[in-house]
Image: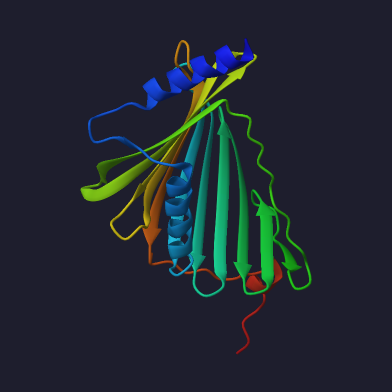
Amino acid sequence: MKKRIISILVLICAVATAGSAQTKQITSNEYFTSNSKAHSLMSERSWRMEMKTDTLNGASIVKSITKTHERLLPDRERFVATEKIGDKETRSELIRVGFMEYRRENNEPWISKDLRGSGGGGIGNSGGFACIQHTEEADAVGGIPARKLRQYSIEKTSEGLSFDDMAVWLDSNGFFLKSERIKGLLEPRTEKSRSVVTYEYEPNIKIEAPIKESESKAPVKS
C-alpha cells in the first residue's frame, strides 16, 4: 500500500510540474548548484533583499510579514521585520557594524552586543517529502531574460496532499532576480502561504550604528 501511495504521489508530482515545451527536468544537483552559485555571487556585492510572506485563509490575508535585509560591504548589515495581524503591527530591527550588534523591538531602546567570542548556531531542516521534482525554463523578470528554476514537492499529511512550490529566477550571470514560494493543499488546490523575494544589487544605502538616546540629547558644546 505504501509503495502504491508513493507511486501515485510521484505521478501527481510529475503532472504538476509539467509546463510549456520549454520546461525541462533537471537534477537536484543542478538546482542546488545554481542556487549555491547565486548565494556565492551575493557575497561579493552589497545588496538589498525584501521578502513578503502572506498567510492565507481562502482569499483573505490573515497575517503579513515583511522582512528587509541589507548588506553593505565589507561588514555592515541591517535587518527589519514587520508583522501585521489585523490592525496590530509589530517591528523588530537588527544592525551589525563590524563586531557590534544592535537590536530592538518596536520603538524600545536599542540593546547592543559585542559579537567577539560568541558562537553561532545553524537551523536544521528535516525532509520527508514523498515526491520532489526539479525543472528549468526560460522566463523574464521585469524585461530581463532569466532562467526559472523550480522545486516542486508533494507530501501526504493529515490534511491531505500538501505541496511546496519554490522557484528562483536567475539572470545570465547567475544572480538572483526574484524568488517565490507557495505552500498549501493540493486537492482541492488551496494556498496556505505565499512568499515573494526581490533583490537589488549595489543599492544606494547607508548603514550606521544607532545613536543612543542619551547621545542624541547631549547638549552642544560651544
Nearer the observer, 190 or 13: 13
Q: Position of residue 52 (x, y in %)?
A: 47, 40
Q: Give the vertical position of 161 relative to 55 (above or below).
A: above
Nearer the observer, 109 or 167: 167
Nearer the observer, 147 or 188: 147
Looking at the image, which residue is at 77% across and 64% down? Answer: 119
- Please say whether residue 56 is visible from this viewpoint: no
Asked if residue 123 lies left or right of residue 151, the reply is right
Q: Give the vertical position of 121 relative to 8 (above or below).
A: below
Q: Where is residue 46 in the image (x, y as percent from the top left)?
A: 44, 67
Q: In which quarter of the image is the C terminus?
A: bottom right
In the rendered image, the residue lying farthest to the right is 117
Asked if residue 29 lies left or right of residue 81, the reply is left
Q: Give the vertical position of 113 relative to 26 (above or below).
A: below
Looking at the image, which residue is at 51% across and 17% down? Answer: 7
Q: Give the vertical position of 134 relative to 113 (above or below).
A: above
Nearer the observer, 148 or 201: 148
Q: Where is residue 174 in the image (x, y as percent from the top left)?
A: 35, 57
Looking at the image, which residue is at 28% across and 57% down? Answer: 172
Q: Quadrant of residue 18?
A: top left
Q: In which quarter of the image is residue 75?
A: bottom right
- Please say whether residue 157 is visible from this viewpoint: yes
Asked if residue 40 lies left or right of residue 140, the reply is right
Q: Which colour scheme is used?
A: rainbow
In the rendered image, the residue lying farthest to the bottom is 222
Q: Quadrant of the N terminus?
A: top right
Q: Position of residue 78 (x, y in %)?
A: 55, 61
